[in-house]
Amino acid sequence: MAEFLSLHDAVARYVEDGATVAMEGFTHLIPFAAGHEVIRQGKRGLTLIRMTPDIVYDQMIGAGCARKVIFSWGGNPGVGSLHRLRDAVEKGWPHKVEILEHSHAAMACAFEAGAAGLPLAVLRGYVGSELPSVNDQIKFIECPFTGERLAAVPSVRPDVSIVHAQKADRAGNVLVEGIIGVQKEAVLAAKKSIVTVEEIVDDLTAQADYHPNACIIPGWAITAIAVAENGAYPSYAHGYYPRSNRFYKEWDTIARDRDTFTAWLDEHIYNAGGQS
C-alpha cells in the first residue's frame, strides 16, 4: 500500500546510487520535480530509462547522475538536440554515458512485458532496421506456432519508477488523466515506485467517472506518494497548468554551454531550497 512521504524522503529512501530508474510521462505529466530532487541529492551511477528523454534527463545527465540511458528517442521537443546528453556521449562531460536505443514500439512492449512479470517482449519490428547492429539486446526468435520470425527484447523491470499525476486519494490510489503514456506499466513493472501528485483528495471513485481518458493506478501497486505542486513544470499537467514553451526554447541556450548550464543548476536546483 502506498505510503505518503515528502519528495525528499521518497527519493532518499528509494533511489539508490547505481539503481535503474524509469521516469515516464508523455508530453505532459513529466516528473520534473522528482528529477530535480534526484539531482539535488547527488545520486550517481543511475541507469535512466525513458521512452522519450527530453530536458529532464538532459538536466540529470549534465548533473552527473547517469551512467547509462535506455530510450527510443531523445531531444528537446520542437527545438533540437539535448546538448548535455550529446556532451556526455561524445566528449565524456561530466563523464561518459552509455546509450542503448530502441524503437518506440519495442520500449512500449518492454514496459508492458515488465508490468506482466515477463522476462521479454516479442514484437513484429526491426525488420530492415540498423538498430540490431548497435544494440545487442535485440534478438530474433521463431514463433513456435507459425514459424514467423519475430523480434525479442528484454522486459523493462526498473528498481524504481517515478511518474507524476494529477491526484491521489487518501487510500493511495492515483488518477492520471489527459494523454496517457506508459505510466501505469512503468509503475507495475518496477520493484518500487514513487508517484508525485498535484494534490490529495478524499476519494477518486466519483471523479474517475467524468474525467477524460482517466487511468487509475491502484494504491497497492505504488510504494510512495509525494505531493509536488507544479511537479511537472515546465511540461504541463492537464487541468492544472500549461506547458512553458518559452522554457523549452530557453533550454537550448542554457544547455549548449557547460558554464551556463552549471550556473543554472546552482541557481535553480542546488540553491533552490526544495521542490523546483
Image: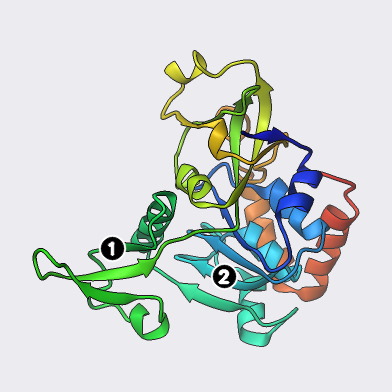
Compared across the picture, whether 28 is left or right of 260 comes to left
User: Where does the image place residue 167, in percent across and percent down from the top left?
Assistant: 61, 27
x and y percentages locating residue 184 in the rendered image: 47, 42
Q: Position of residue 84 (x, y in %)?
A: 67, 72
- Residue at left offset 52%, top offset 68%: 70
Residue 210 visible in the current orientation: no
Query: Could you say where residue 175 lies in the image, as x and y percent from the top left?
Result: 53, 29
> Tag on residue 122?
1
For label 1, count other residues whose C-alpha is less than 10 Å away and answer few (under 14), some (14-19) or many (20+): some
Q: Quadrant of residue 166?
A: top right
Quarter where residue 153 is shown: bottom left
Q: For this view, does 97 lie left or right of residue 147?
A: right
Whether 146 is drawn above or below 92: the answer is above
Residue in the picture at 63% in, 54% down = 248
Viewed as shown, does residue 268 lie left or right of 194?
right
- Secondary element type, mark 1: strand
Circle nearer the N terminus (1, 2)? 2
* Few, some or many residues within 10 Å of mark 2 (<14, 14–19, 20+): many
**Residue where numbered disc 2 is placed:** 69
Q: Residue furthest left?
A: 146
